[in-house]
Each structure stands twice: as structure tokens, then as C-alpha cells.
């Protein structure tokens, strides 16, 4: 059965016409959903009762259930656990910045990529999320969406480029005037470096920000925490990133989790400076949160500073990312999935 959150206004119009409902009702329905955050046909009094009854039967709202909500002590980060009808759950995180609110969306239930530092991958891949299921993650934060929604980062559970069609539909949908009217420049898609769809994405010509998880300066080191390196080695990832920049004019961001005694040593700093020398890119360094299960630990402040300073002194564009949400397991690589009976 169709999910209204998957639909563009034009798609809803043809659905309505097909059911004998007037086309202009789509304007009213979109206004109810995206401006008033109403997800129940009975609460849409502008629609005739007969239309509401028909829509309740033909296009029921399947809004996910908010199972839990956690707020960080500084109240800047909120994490919710959403439950879908099939019993699967995903986490979504809201981050309140001084320039506006940003929401981190999950694109899959579980993940097949299996990065060593990532809690999301522990139960493997379960299924893709639809565009509508991604939209409902934004709508679940309704009171923070208007007028302060600044950006969407597709950086939660899942590898977005392994759910390419749905993620693309999602990005197009949130850009529509009748939904969130979010600029493509305010959307960041984060990938572990799945090379073929990076070329596809470049062809779309959307000026989104592409963020690539790098996390190590050599294939040898990277494959120890990111087994995907065996399929897509660094050389191929960097060539695809260069192509993306040439096609879109958008500077690619590389995410680099700093792990003690592993990837932020003096040797790694030299190797990374060499790898990125002359490239028009940005590196986002993020100290890892201690993960005792897999034995990965946060470097000391001086190790972090030495690493960043070395790269900056070698003309590499690198910044230390502000960390948010680590107290509620909402930071990078900390989202988990749980299966619940809804
Ligand atoms: S970091 Fe991203 S790509 Fe890697 S396992 Fe976690 S969700 Fe998947």
C-alpha cells in the first residue's frame, strides 16, 4: 500500500484524481502535513468527509511510533528511537546549533559495511528505508522543523549509497517547495566510499555536500577498520571524489575519526598530508568516543593537536569537528538499532 510520505505533490495529485478526488486537495493535504504537521485524515477539516473516509481506507497514514526520546545534559542534542510497522527501528538525532537545527537521518535498518568502530553495523543489514520513512524522521521532530531547520545530514545508520534510489528521492522530496524547501547545499550525504554510485551521484548534478569516511591514510591501515577498502581501495575512492568535484564544483569532505595509537600518529600525519597534498578538499577530524568492546580509544588532547597542526602546517584544509551527543550515544558511529514489537 502507498505511503503518503513517499509522494511528491504531483504524485499525490494523480493518486487523488485516480480515486475521484479533486486535484487541488493535494495542496491542502501537503499544507496540513508539512506546515501543520497533521498526520491524521480526521484532523483535516477542509477535506470533505467522504474524501477523508476514502483516504483513510486507500492511503492510511503510517507514521512511525516514537519509542523513546533522550536529551543530552546540555539540551543541544535529542535522539529519538522510531518504530516502523514491521517492528524495525531506527534512531534519528537532532542537533541544535546557533545557526539553526540539523537532523541526522538513518537511511537503512542496520548496515552491511561493517566498520569496526560503528555500533550501527553490529546486527548486520536488515533492510533499506523508503524515502517516506526518511521524511518521517524529520517530521518526528516537528516542533524543531519550522522555522529553524537548517540542514539534513544523511549520516545515521546505513550506507546511503547502497540505498541509492530511495535516498535520491528523499533528497529531491525535501528540496520541494511544498515540503521543507531545503537547499541542496544544506544536505550532506556521508558514504564509506562506495565508488560506482559516487559517479552516478555526480551525474545528477545536485549541489549537495558529499562526505567520505576516510579514517586512515593507507589501504593497509584502513582495511583494519573498514573492510570495504578491499572492494573499493583508497585510490579508486579518491579518483571518484575528484570526479565528483569536477562535475559539481562542490568540495568533497573527508571524515577522519581519530583513534589512539592507530591513525593519528606522526607517521599517519605525514602519509595523510602526502595523500591529500594539492587536493581541493576539507578534512573533518573527529576524536573517537572510547569503545572498550572493540578496543578503540580516544587520543589525548596533545596527540589530537599535534596531528591537526602538522596537517595545517602542510597546507591541508583540516578542522576538528564539534562533538555533540556523545553522552546519549548519538555521536558518529554510536547509533544502534533495536528490534521491538510495536
Ligand atoms: S559507519 Fe556507516 S557505513 Fe560504516 S558500518 Fe556504520 S553505518 Fe555502515
Image (cartoon, rainbow, N blue to C red):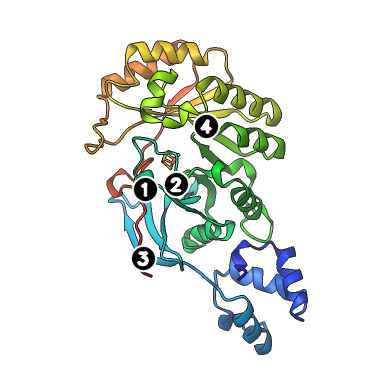
Marks 3/1: CA–CA distance: 15 Å
Between tags 1 and 4, which lies in front? 4
Give the residue pinned by disc 4.
193
Q: Residue at x 62, y 39 (%)?
A: 208
**Residue 315, can we see it?**
no
Sequence-wise, the earlier of marks 1 and 2 is: 2
Q: Secondary structure at mark 3?
A: strand
The residue under label 3 is 67
**Residue ranking furthest to the front:** 231
Say if 117 sits above or below 10 in the image: above
Q: Position of residue 140 (x, y in %)?
A: 47, 63
Q: Earlier in the sequence, mark 1 or mark 4?
A: 4
Quadrant including the C terminus: bottom left
Q: Residues within 10 Å of mark 1 (few under 14, many from 20)?
A: many
Image coordinates of residue 217 in percent, x first then y, are 43, 18
Q: Closest to the observer: 11 or 35?
A: 11
| Comes first in the chain, label 3 or label 1 | 3
Ligand 1 image position (quadrant): top left
Q: Residue at x 54, y 19 (%)?
A: 235
Q: Which residue is mark 2?
A: 156
Q: Residue 335 bears which disc, if any? A: 1
Q: Find out if the beta carbon at label 2 lies less than 8 Å from the nearest ligand 1 atom.
A: yes
- The alpha-carbon separation of the residues under discs 3 and 4 comes to 32 Å
Label whose residue precedes the other's in the sequence (3 or 4):
3
Amino acid at each position: 500500500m502507498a505511503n503518503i510520505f513517499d509522494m511528491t505533490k504531483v504524485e499525490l495529485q494523480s493518486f487523488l484524481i485516480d480515486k475521484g478526488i479533486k486535484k487541488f486537495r493535494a495542496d491542502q493535504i501537503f499544507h496540513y502535513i508539512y506546515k501543520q504537521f497533521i498526520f491524521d485524515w480526521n484532523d483535516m477539516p477542509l477535506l470533505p468527509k467522504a474524501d477523508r473516509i476514502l483516504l483513510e481506507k486507500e492511503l492510511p497514514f503510517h507514521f512511525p511510533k516514537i519509542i523513546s526520546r533522550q536529551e543530552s545534559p546540555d539540551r543541544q542534542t535529542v535522539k529519538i528511537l522510531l518504530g516502523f510497522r514491521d517492528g524495525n527501528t531506527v534512531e534519528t538525532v537532532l542537533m541544535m546549533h546557533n545557526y539553526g537545527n540539523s537532523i541526522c537521518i538513518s537511511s537503512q535498518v542496520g548496515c552491511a559495511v561493517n566498520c569496526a568502530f560503528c555500533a550501527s553495523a553490529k546486527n548486520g543489514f536488515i533492510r533499506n528505508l523508503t524515502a517516506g520513512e526518511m521524511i518521517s524522521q524529520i517530521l518526528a521532530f516537528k516542533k524543531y522543523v519550522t522555522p529553524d531547520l537548517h540542514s539534513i545530514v544523511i549520516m545515521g545508520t546505513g550506507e546511503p549509497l547502497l540505498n541509492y534510489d530511495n535516498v535520491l528521492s528523499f533528497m529531491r522530496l525535501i528540496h520541494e517547495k511544498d515540503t521543507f524547501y531545503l537547499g541542496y547545499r544544506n544536505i550532506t550525504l556521508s558514504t564509506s566510499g562506495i565508488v560506482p554510485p559516487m559517479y552516478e551521484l555526480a551525474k545528477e548534478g545536485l549541489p549537495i555536500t558529499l562526505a567520505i569516511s576516510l579514517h586512515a591514510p593507507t589501504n593497509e591501515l584502513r582495511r583494519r577498520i573498514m573492510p570495504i577498502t578491499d572492494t573499493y581501495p583508497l585510490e579508486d575512492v579518491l579518483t571518484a571524489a575528484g570526479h565528483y568535484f569536477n562535475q559539481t564544483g562542490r568540495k568533497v569532505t573527508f571524515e577522519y575519526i581519530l583513534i589512539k595509537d592507530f591513525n593519528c600518529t606522526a607517521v599517519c600525519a605525514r602519509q595523510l598530508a602526502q595523500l591529500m597534498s594539492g587536493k581541493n578538499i576539507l578534512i573533518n577530524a573527529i576524536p573517537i568516543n572510547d569503545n572498550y568492546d572493540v578496543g578503540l580509544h580516544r587520543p589525548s588532547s596533545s596527540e589530537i593537536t599535534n596531528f591537526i597542526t602538522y596537517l595545517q602546517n602542510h597546507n591541508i584544509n583540516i578542522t576538528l569537528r564539534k562533538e555533540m551527543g556523545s553522552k546519549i550515544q548519538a555521536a558518529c558511529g554510536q547509533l544502534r538499532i533495536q528490534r521491538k514489537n510495536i
